[in-house]
Amino acid sequence: MYMFINKIKVYVETHSKIAGFLATIIGIISFLPVLYVVYKTKKTINFPYRTLILALLSNLLWIYYSVAKYPKIDFK
């Protein structure tokens, strides 16, 4: 039983690091279309929806990362 729990712990630690890395990359990439549209049109009205989806994905990965990294935080 101990080996099984240890394997799960290693699995979660590995995947939480990957999720944190992906969240950083996606968070940076998600704003590139916005910068391009604003630069080309000189207006902020044309906001790409793909940017919002990528930002949401990035934030969800950050939430997963924090829950996996710090599972014993008590919010009392």
Image: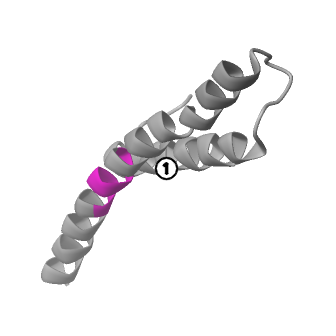
The structure residue drawn at horizontal position 42% and vertical position 37%, both measured from the top left corner, is: 73
Residue 3 occupies which quadrant of the picture?
Answer: bottom left
Residue 66 visible at all: no
- Along the viewing direction, whichever of 44 and 58 lies nearer the viewer: 44
Where does the N terminus fall, quadrant-wise? bottom left
The structure residue drawn at horizontal position 25% and vertical position 69%, both measured from the top left corner, is: 11
Q: Magenta region, mostly helix, strand or loop?
A: helix
Would you name the residue on which mark 1 appears? 61
Mark 1 surroundings: few (<14), some (14-19) or many (≥20) residues within 10 A? many
- Asked if the magenta segment contains residue 37, the reply would be no
Q: Is residue 23 above or below residue 3?
A: above
The structure residue drawn at horizontal position 35% and vertical position 45%, both measured from the top left corner, is: 20
Direction left: furthest residue:
3
Percent position of residue 68, x then y: 38, 52
Residue 8 occupies which quadrant of the picture?
Answer: bottom left
Percent position of residue 72, x then y: 38, 44
Q: Which residues are magenta?
A: 15-20
Q: Is residue 6 above or below residue 61?
A: below
- Along the viewing direction, whichever of 58 and 40 lies nearer the viewer: 40
Identify the amino acid type marked 1.
Leu
Percent position of residue 60, x then y: 57, 48
Residue 48 visible at all: yes
The structure residue drawn at horizontal position 49% and vertical position 49%, both measured from the top left corner, is: 61
Direction right: furthest residue:
45
> Does residue 7 appear to the left or right of 24 in the view shown?
left
> Does residue 64 appear to the left or right of 11 in the view shown?
right
- Along the viewing direction, whichever of 39 and 13 lies nearer the viewer: 39
Where does the C terminus fall, quadrant-wise? top right
- Asked if the magenta segment contains residue 16, the reply would be yes
